[in-house]
Amino acid sequence: EKIKAFYGYRGAVADTWPLAVGRVRAKVSPSTALERCRTAVVKACKNGETLLVHLGPDIADFVGKFSIGENRKYLHSSVFDFQGLLESSIRERMYLEEDKEAGQCVVRDGFRVVVTACYDASGDMSSVRLQELKDKVPFFEDMQVVRCRG
């Protein structure tokens, strides 16, 4: 939570936990959670800030469920790929007209993405948890894992 708060002040946070647990437990609809994530991505791109994609203790399926159809315009799998949002066609799907500057989907210098996931209850990353990340987070195997304690 401390890392999430830090990036809330220094960038933008896409909190994906509500997508993993559903409406009842998260107390927010999936469509609202997706729109909040989209807004965070656009804000970070436009301001050249760090986007924190916070997975939380439960991980939404961004390889399957949230990578198809209309969901792609909210949190496209390219968000998880190094320089994935530099392709304008991807940003065109995510930016609304009011997000654009002079008709352009801007990405300013300094934009970067950090993905955080919670360790298991034991305080370690079990092989089961690691496999869940590989199965549900696009391009996970291309990411560098840095262990942090908050």
Image (tube, rainbow, N blue to C red):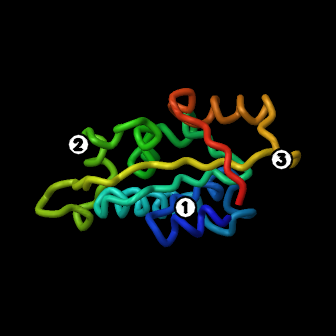
Neighbourhood count class around disc 1 (C-alpha, 10 Å): few under 14, some 14–19, many 20 upward: many
The label shown at residue 123 is 3
Neighbourhood count class around disc 2 (C-alpha, 10 Å): few under 14, some 14–19, many 20 upward: some
Secondary structure found at label 3: loop
Does label 2 or label 1 sit earlier along the sequence?
Answer: 1
Which amino acid, by three-letter code, is at mark 2? Ser
> Which percent across, then down, holds residue 110?
32, 54
Which amino acid, by three-letter code, is at mark 3? Gly
Q: Residue at x 22, y 54 (%)?
A: 105
The label shown at residue 67 is none
Secondary structure found at label 1: helix
> Which percent across, then down, holds residue 94?
34, 52
Q: CA distance from mark 2 to mark 1?
A: 24 Å
Residues at marks 3 and 2 touching, judged by CB atoms closer than 8 Å? no
Asked if residue 48 is positioned above or below residue 120 in the image, the reply reads below
The label shown at residue 33 is 1
Q: Nearer the viewer, mark 3 or mark 2?
A: 3
| Quarter assignment of residue 2 | bottom right
Horizontal side of 150 relative to 88 (left or right) equals right
The residue that mark 2 highlights is 88
Front-most of 121 and 145?
Answer: 145
> Which percent across, then down, holds residue 112?
40, 49
Q: Residue at x 25, y 55 (%)?
A: 108
> Which percent across, then down, holds residue 80?
47, 40
